[in-house]
Amino acid sequence: MHSRMEHRGIVAVLVLVVGLFAWTAAAEQVVTSTEGMVATAHELASEAGAEILAMGGNAVDAAVAAAFAITVVEPNASSLGGEGYMVISLADGRDLAIDYKSVAPGHITYEDDNDEPRRGPESTCVPGVVAGLALALEEYGTMTLAEVMAPAIRLARDGFALDPVLYDNLSNLYGYTDSGTDPIVGPVYFPDGFIPDIGVTLVQKDLAYALELIAEQGPSVFYRGEIALAIEEITEGFLRYGDLQRYQAVIRDPVVSEYRGYEVIGTPPNVAGVTVAEALNILDNFDLSPLSWDNPTAVHIVAEALKLASADRLPYVGDPDFYDVPLEGLLSEEYATARASLIDLDNAIMPTNSTPTGDPYLYMAVGEPVAVGEEVYSPSTTQLSILDSDGNAVSITQTLSSFWGSRLMVPGYGFFINDELHNFNDYNPDNLADINVHQPFKRPRTVIAPTIVRDPAGEVFMVVGTPGAGRIPSTVVLTIINVIDFGMSLEEAILAPKFCSRVAYKELRMEGGYPQETLDALAALGHTVKADYDEVDLYFGGINAILVEDGVMTGVGSFRRDGGAAAP
C-alpha cells in the first residue's frame, strides 16, 4: 500500500418567491447570469465549476471540475467508483455523447444470477467516471486535468461543512451497514462511532490522495496502477485488474429529435434518451398548450405517451456494442403517429394480447404491467448542467446506482464502488429474447437521461436532467413540456408536481400537489392512481437545470435535494 505521508499532491444571486407552488427559493438555488452557469446537487460543486469558468475554461472544463467535486461533496450519489453519461452541445454545431457507463466484469456469463445484488463485492461493475471525465477533457476541454481537479482536491483535503442532506444520507448508510464500526468507512464518516454534527468540517484525506494521483498521473493510475489493484482487492477479485485495464469510455452519436420546433439532444442506448425522445415524438401529435399542467386530459395524454415509450425500451434498448437498436424506426415520425393513435382520450390503455406490426420491426404491445414489488430504489444518482458564455453546453448524469453503491469503500482511497450489476436482468430460459442479461464487458441498461434542448434558432435553450431511478424519463419530459407547452419559468417547471408512468409500475404515481378533482378524473379514465407522496418529494428526482431567455441564463439547483447554482 502507499504511504500518504510521503506524498503531497498538488454570484450573482437572485432570490425568488415562486408563488404558484407556495415555495420560497433559497438564495443559492436560483441564479441568473450572462457569463455562464453551473447547476448541480450541491452549491460547492456548482462553485467549483463556476471557478473554472471564471478562469477562462469552457463548459467542458467546468463540467469535469464540477463532476469531480460532486464526488467529494455528494459521495452517496456519485463517486470515482461510479458511472455516468455526458451529452455535449458545442457552439460550433457539433453534438455528441460520452458513454462512461460501467461494464460487467469479464468472468460474468448470462447464466450468472446474483441472489444478493445490492451489497458487497458481487454487486459491482467496472467503474467509468474517471475514464469518461478524462476523455471529455482531453477531447473537448481547454485546461489540464490538474487544473480542473484542483477544486475537488481542495474540498477533500481541506474539508467542507457537513450539510443536512449528507447528514441524513450518512444516517441511512449507518443503518444499512453498521458503518460506524466499519474499519474503512468508520474513520472517514463516523469518528468516535457517530455521525458528526451538521456544520462540522468533513475532511476526506484518502479521497484527496486518490484525486491527487489522478490529477498527476491521469486515468491510468485508476485503471492500470495502484488504485486498480486496490479495487481488485476490496472486491475480492470480483472486479479483476484485467477488467479495469480493458475499460474504455466511448464517444457516441447522441439521439437527436424535434419537439414543437425545438431540437432535443439526448443519450443514445442503452440509457433513456431514446425513451424521452419517443415520448416527446408521440406528444408532438397532441396540442397541449390550451390545457394546464394539472388538467386531467393533459396528464392522461402525457402518461400514456410515457407508458408507450417505456414499453418499447424493454425489448429494443440494449447495449449498442451488443445489439443493433432500431433507432431509426423507434424515432420516426410515422412510428410516433402510429403510437399516438393508440392513445384513447377517454380511456387508459388496458392490457392487450395483440401485437401490432410496424416497419421495420414488431413493436411491443402494452400488456399487463410488470410487478416490481415494494421498490428498493433510492433516489440515487446526481445531475450536473453547465453552459458557458460561448454557447457550449454539457449535461451529465452520474451515479453509483443505489445511494452509497455497494457500500464498499476502497481502503486508502476513500471512495465507494457502485452496485450496478443488479441493473442486468437475471437469465430466464423462458425469455431468450431478453437483451439485458449478464454478459462479459456489457453495459447494464439504466434510465439516466441528461438532455440539452436547442431553440428553433439553433441556440441552447435548456440544459436539464435528474436523478430518480425509474422516474427519470417522466420527470425530464414533464419539465420540458412545462416550459415549452405550458409557458412556465424554469423554477415553476421544476417545482410543479410530477408523476411517473411506465409499464414497470401498476399505478400512475403522482407527487403531492395535484388537485383532488384531477386525481378523481384520472381514476375515472381507468388509471390506478397512487398519490400518497409528499409535495416536492425527492422520490420524483432532483432536477438541476439551466434555461436561456433573451440572453440571460437562469440556473436552478434542485429544490427536492437542496441543490445550488453558481455563475462565474
Image: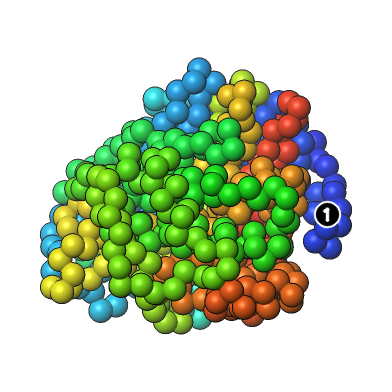
Residue farthest along the top direction in this orientation: 92
- Residue 180 visible within the image: no
* The one of 51 and 545 positioned closer to us in this rendering: 545
Give the residue displayed 62% in from the left and 78% down from the top: 524
**Measured along the vertical axis of the image, is residue 162 above or below residue 190?**
above
**Measured along the vertical axis of the image, is residue 156 above or below residue 124?**
above
Percent of width and height locating residue 126:
28, 53
Q: Is residue 103 left or right of residue 304?
A: left
Q: Tell me how the rendering is colored.
A: rainbow
Percent of width and height locating residue 74:
55, 56
Q: Is residue 301 left or right of residue 502?
A: right
Which quadrant: the C terminus? Answer: top right
Percent of width and height locating residue 400:
42, 59
The image quadrant of residue 327 is top left
Give the residue displayed 45% in from the left and 23% down from the top: 94
Amino acid on which disc 1 is placed = Val
Q: Is residue 371 left or right of residue 39?
A: left
The image quadrant of residue 418 is bottom left
Percent of width and height locating residue 231:
28, 56
Which residue bears the numbered disc 1?
18
